[in-house]
Amino acid sequence: MAVVLGMDCVLYYGTAGSTADTEADNVKDVTLNLEKGEADATTRGNDGWRATVGTLKDGSVSFDIVWDSSDAFFTALQEAWFDGDAIALLILSGAVAVSGVEGLDADYAIINFTRNESLEEVVTVSVTAKPTYSTRAPSWYTVS
């Protein structure tokens, strides 16, 4: 297994309803959160141990971008947040042209679009996106 550096991962964006295909290069510190809800399946037969079963999957992606109103990705996110529209995001462990890279493909709602104005830093935006109601369910994307 090869080590993957964060700087080699790629976030793509595009029009909701289809797989994102435009690379977003104005992005840093991306975190893909994948979780499941849980249900208690404990029985007397578990010999005193609690048993848990995974239920609904939950995913989100959070990242920071530089505030740049001339950047197409920034503008797409800002418009998606203000208009309440979905945006396609594909969060991959490498470029889409590289065999074996993988990540989550879905249409997302922009849930958080927070401007950060640190005194000695450039202005950035912290973004959180979650899969939204769409014609396509989130899927795990693997380049073969």
Image (cartoon, grey):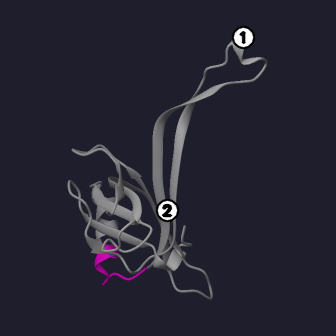
Q: Which mark is residue 44?
A: 1
Q: Is residue 129 above or below residue 23?
A: above
Q: Is residue 24 left or right of residue 128?
A: left
Amino acid under label 2?
Answer: Ser
Amino acid beneath label 1:
Arg
Is residue 80 shown left or right of residue 38? left
Magenta stretch in the rendered image? 67-75
Q: Secondary structure at mark 2?
A: strand
Look at the image and say whether residue 69 sits in the magenta stretch: yes
The answer to whether 92 appears left or right of 3 in the picture is left
What residue is at 45 percent from the left and 73 percent from the top? 9
Q: Quadrant of the C terminus?
A: bottom left
Q: Residue furthest front?
A: 1
Judging by the rendered image, the residue that carries numbered circle 2 is 62
Label 1 and label 2: CA atoms lie apart by 41 Å
Which comes before the other along the chain, label 1 or label 2?
Answer: 1
Q: Is residue 2 magenta?
A: no
